[in-house]
Image (tube, rainbow, N blue to C red):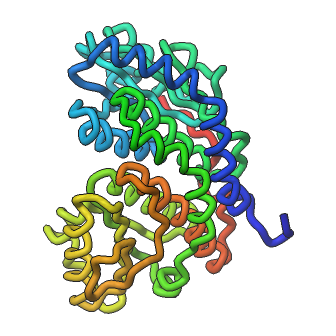
Amino acid sequence: MTAAQTQMRTEVLEIPVAAERLLANGGDAIQRAADAVRARDPQFLVSVARGSSDHVATYLKYASELLLGTPLASIGPSIASIYGRKLRLDGSVCLSVSQSGKSPDIVEMARTARESGALSIAMTNQPESPLAQVADHTLNLHAGPELSVAATKTFVNSTIAGIWLLAECAEDMALQSAIADLPSKLEQAVQLDWPEARAALAGRNSIFCLGRGPAYAISNEAALKFKETCQIHAESYSSAEVLHGPISIVDGGFPVIGLAAQDEAESALASVADDIAAKGAAVFATSEKLDRATQLKTIRTGHALTDPISLIASFYAMVEKVAASRGINPDAPRHLKKVTETV
């Protein structure tokens, strides 16, 4: 590592290796959890998470509903930790996602969900953490130490562990094959850093991030990373919602990034991206279906549900360079620390 290279950059480049480590070591735990989910045959799933981990849960919501036809709803951790209420979760599955597994509100909600009848599955990079202790099954992310405050490889491994679990539950061989091939795709994805989009951010302090379906979760994560690593005010919208009001603040050169997987929502997002570009905004999107907006190079993964994982890897490579260009150290964002413990 050179003196000029940030810890965040180092960890972004480690994403393919971390993914390969998860695939090599996580299979038994994934299979046991999938067997338990199939045996339960839940009518619905719930998730418990905050921050980047909650964006993982949003991704898994769309994946569960598209792949299994099983709805997944997010539970506010404060229902248990602050309000002390119990929910009727008998027969459901609870997915709790926390890189550290330490936040008291996440742990309390996961514990309460299990007591309320849910099959509890924890996804964490710390398999001995308090969260793991209140779960029926723990999926170790195997991401290795992550020192930069900005979560990157733990986010990617969380998405892989979650989609792998759902693929095993669905016994979807095509998706399982795409997951197995992810390390090679991610190796290519982290080499992309979208210089054309970076150039459009010069002198700008606001940006829209757009997504649709599973890629909407990636848009949410992108907006968070702009804020925490670059001090750029970023808002994430579904491309179905951005024209219903938010578009009013767009002016000439206003930067917009659309994150599209190669799925049924791609054309709709591309159409909105073109509409916004026609209003004078500087619009970029990961799609070949654009007329006015600028295409960002993308590494496709062979499956629509794994494409968002490649997208976020390239985004991380880009946003680290944006932070550096602004003289900001993304490893130590102001007012933030690596582990945030809320009640």
Judged from this view, the residue extending furthest toward the left is 244
Q: Residue 38 vs residue 331: left or right?
A: left
Image quadrant occupied by the N terminus:
bottom right
State the residue at coordinates (28%, 77%).
289
Given residues 118 and 332, the one toward you in this image is 118
Residue 80 lies, in percent from the top left, at 36, 20
Q: Is residue 13 above or below residue 158?
A: below
Q: Quadrant of residue 65?
A: top left
- Please identify the quarter of the rendering in which residue 246 is found: bottom left
Q: Nearer the viewer, residue 254 or 214?
A: 214
Q: Is residue 131 visible?
A: no
- Is residue 95 visible in the rendered structure shown here? yes
Query: Taking 249 as reference, is 313 left or right?
Result: right
- Image position, residue 247 (x, y; %): 21, 76
Residue 323 drawn at (x, y percent):
61, 72
* Residue shown at the point (54%, 21%) measured from the top left: 138
Q: Is residue 122 above or below residue 188?
A: above
Q: Residue at x 85, y 69 (%)?
A: 2
Q: Quadrant of residue 187?
A: bottom right
Residue at image x 49%, y 17%?
32
Count the numbered circles shown. Answer: 0
Whether residue 218 is situated above or below residue 191 in the rendered picture: above
Horizontal relation, residue 280 to residue 151: left or right: left
Image coordinates for residue 53, horizontal then vertical, percent: 47, 41
